[in-house]
Amino acid sequence: MSEAKDANAIKTIQPVILRTDNIAKELVRVSSSYKVPVGMLDFNLLSMQTYTKSGAQDSEDWEELSADEIKDLDNDPQLNSSDFQIKQSYEIEIFTLVKESTFPTMKVSIGANSTMTKVYLTIKPGSTLEYYENFSQDFITLINKKKLRANIMIGIFDRTMAESVSSLNAKLQVNNIIEFKKKEILQVAQGIEPQKTVDDALILHYENKKEMNESDRIDYARRGYLLSVVEDELLIEYIKPKIGTPGRDCRGEYIEPSESIIKNEPTFNVSEKIAVVEDDLSILYRSKENGYVVFENGTYDIKSEVELGEISFKTTGNIETDLDADVLINVSEKDVMKDAIGMGMEVEVNEIHVEGNVGPNAKVHSMKATIDGQTHKSSYVESDILDINIHKGKAKGREIHITRLEHGEVIGDIVTISQALGGRVSAREITIETLGSHVKLNASHSITINKVQGGENTLTIDPLISQECQNDVADGSKLIKETQDSLKVLEAEVERHMTLIKKNEPAYIDIKKRLIHYKQSGVKMPSAFVKKYKQFHFYYERSDALKAELKDKKENLELLKAKYNSAQNDIFEARIINNDRWKNHNEIIFKLINPALEINFVPEHNSVMKILGLVEKEEEFYIAEVDE
């Protein structure tokens, strides 16, 4: 009973033969008419005709193509014409699917890109394929049925299908069975992809330099008050409109390119400082010089100097320009009760002149800076050339001049301070006009004091004052150790070869004499003698090569030691100069590298010792007055 019930569950229909230009539509119609699920219906393609026509849409002058004409249709230039039309007509037999498909272990689907110009067959994970003789033909039939169900033409635009199936067939021939552990996509049709129409656009490249935070929201502290540029930098780009090229999808439909939208044509002017370069595609606006961009009265211009009352979160936000851009900022706020550069502000500019104060946690980075007011103790100023009136914060630069140091920190190359009232200075050369109290001076070359007023100061000569010097010495020490270790190995190798040569030298001389005798007598030399002679000769050549290598390594070691010791030797050339009497308690320190020692000295109060240096005598080091 159950078997009969299952058999009756599948309703079959008599095969239906019909002609159509839309197979998917006919399958749905037959399904509805016979009350059979469309998934239970299949079809055979009995015949197919392909027609084309040119001219008016309502024309009935369709021409049927031959098989050869269909093959050449892919390259027909008429495909790019809107007047050219293609259609296909199919004679099919629709029937009930009562047996498994040709590929029962295959799960596939058909898909296309948005323009229907590329069609893909996706083989889903878990599918398997097994090779047999007619695989290619049956697989193409499967693909064509999938395409026809999707109302996609067959026999046209399908060169990629032949390539994909051929590649898959080759893999099957080699492996016999393919198991698809992940999906594989095969391109099975390629129409004519249209070129997208380009709408006009105006791109303000100089504005795109504004920094964004992680959530792509504008950081208002970095809202780009000044937008710096350098010579030849692209400022603005106008992309001209361009109508795209037409296409043809895999259903044979013509794809009309859209009209360009024009709404960004330039209406501004530019000054002589901006170059304009135009071609068929765009108009480019490039800076002719360094500076920053301004837009005033409908005109873009490049300027290099800007006057500001103050730099604060409220008025400007942070100002960050390229250090290479020749921008000068003058900040005029000089009220001692206000900050010219406000709390937490960051300024990066080629040159800045601040008439007033630099506030707490403010940071200034420039090539040249002048601060007429004072710096807060938590501020940071870095500039190649730096001039500060009253310094309480941290400053770093190459050439630094400070009128009055009040417990601030200074790191530089050449530092000059008019009056030091506490603080810390590290530099190659330091000059102090008037030295107060509680100042720590660290120099690698010289410290010069013109007047001593206070005490409890520390004046240190340290060859390794900079991190770069410390790294160089550390690297040098490591290289010296590695070279010394390799020398020991090489010396042992040379010694071994020399011992071997010395031991076998009599035998070598004897064989050499015999070989000369054989050669003069015209007698063939025994191969054993020749071999032994070549072996001895190799020992001599190898010994010479090792000696040459040993010599080079020793010379290299001496160079490394000389470079390593140069910093140590420099300390004997370093000087602490006091053009005044020593007053109160001031400690002098010279730091040696090797051995790592600190030599201390405290000049007596009211003593006159103008030039102090480090002296070595009988392997003892001490600080003493020396000649200049």
Image (tube, helix red, strand yellow):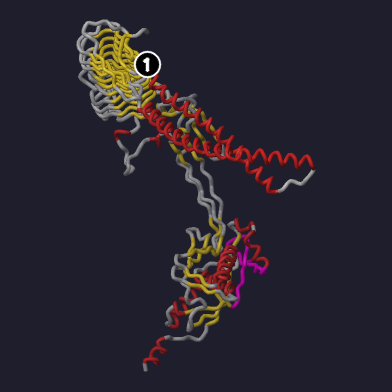
Q: Quadrant of the N terminus?
A: bottom left
Q: Quadrant of the C terminus?
A: top left
> At 70% from the left edge and 38% from the top edge, which residue is drawn?
513
Query: Circle 1 — which element?
Result: helix
Residue 50 falls within the magenta-colored stretch: yes
Q: Return the residue at label 1.
A: 572
Count numbered badges in the picture.
1
- Does residue 388 appear left or right of residue 38 in this picture? left
Residue 92 falls within the magenta-colored stretch: no
Instruction: Spot the residue most to the right.
Output: 522
Q: Quadrant of residue 453?
A: top left
Q: 485 or 264: which is nearer to us? A: 485
> Can you give x and y, in whole percent of width and height, for residue 590 in the image?
31, 18
Q: Quadrant of residue 326?
A: top left
Q: 212 or 43: which is nearer to us? A: 212
Sort mark 1 into few (<14), some (14-19) or many (20+) by Cα contacts within 10 Å.
some
- Does residue 117 appear left or right of residue 614 in this picture? right
> At 68% from the left edge and 41% from the top edge, which residue is drawn?
511
Q: Is residue 217 visible?
A: yes
> Is 627 situated above or below 88?
above
> Can you give x and y, in whole percent of width and height, for residue 366 in the image?
36, 24
> Can you give x and y, in whole percent of width and height, for residue 342 in the image?
25, 26
Q: 556 or 548: which is nearer to us? A: 548
Mark 1 is on which residue type? Answer: Phe
> Is 178 situated above or below 587?
below
> At 76% from the left edge and 41% from the top edge, which residue is drawn?
519
Q: 165 or 291: which is nearer to us? A: 165
Residue range in magenta is: 46-67
> Can you give x and y, in whole percent of width and height, for residue 558 in the image?
47, 26
